[in-house]
Amino acid sequence: MSTSTIPKVFWFFGLSGSGKSTLSNRLGEALKSKGLPVFSIDGDQLRQGINKDLGFSSDDRMENIRRAAEISKLMSDNNQIVLASFITPEESHRDMVSQVLGNTVRFIFVDADLKTCRQRDVKGLYRQVDEGSLAQFTGVSAPFERSKKVDLVLDTTMNSVDECLTQLLHTFFHNR
């Protein structure tokens, strides 16, 4: 499988708890097992380090995503397949990602209903929103704009991780 025919950046986006990082990690394992160079990046990682100075206002979210896109570009320019997992709640954020990455990016909307995301709340974030200790939470107290510009939609409410991984591999890596 040649990396020259594979899109360089796969941008997984959706609500917290939708399964973005899980699917990205599983795809990374599958690609690494084929000997492909993979770099994974997600919002939690960046907010613990390089983006710890940012809050959750629309402007801060835009800057968070801009930095992630620039890091993704650096890695893809160095022949890495980049698997990026970010909520990326606004269409303007995704447009900016497209501006930075051009035709090297494929957007994968990881769709799950709010009830399912709440059930998967491993970080306790939805509970914090319900208790009033966390404001501006995407999908509850801050907007999430569904996109019409996606390369693939993976419904993790209706499909298992394995089914979604199969769909990812078939869509982007079939016959490569």
Image: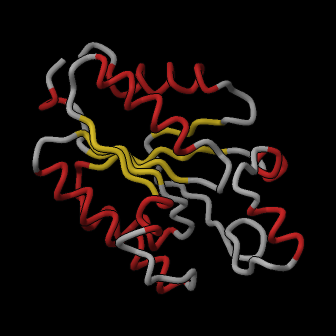
- Compared to residue 112, the image places residue 73 above or below, namely below
Q: Which residue is drawn at 80% across and 79% down?
A: 133
Is 133 positioned to the left or the right of 9 in the image?
A: right
- Foreground residue among 105 and 161: 161
- Foreground residue among 149 and 172: 172
Q: Residue at x 35, y 72 (%)?
A: 50
Please give the count of numbered marks on the rendered protein. Answer: 0
- Foreground residue among 142 and 47: 47
* Residue extending furthest toward the front: 49
Q: Which residue is drawn at 34% across and 64% down?
A: 68
* Residue extending furthest toward the top: 175
Is 166 positioned to the left or the right of 120 in the image?
A: left
On the image, the x and y values in percent for residue 69 come to 31, 63
On the image, the x and y values in percent for residue 10 come to 36, 44
Is 101 positioned to the left or the right of 88 in the image?
A: left
Is 95 positioned to the left or the right of 7 in the image?
A: right
On the image, the x and y values in percent for residue 17 come to 68, 49
Quadrant into which the C terminus falls: top left
Picture quarter containing residue 110?
Answer: top right
- Compared to residue 97, the image places residue 6 above or below, namely above
Q: Which residue is drawn at 57% across and 27% down?
A: 164
Quadrant into which the N terminus falls: top left
Rendering colour mode: secondary structure
On the image, the x and y values in percent for residue 88 come to 51, 64
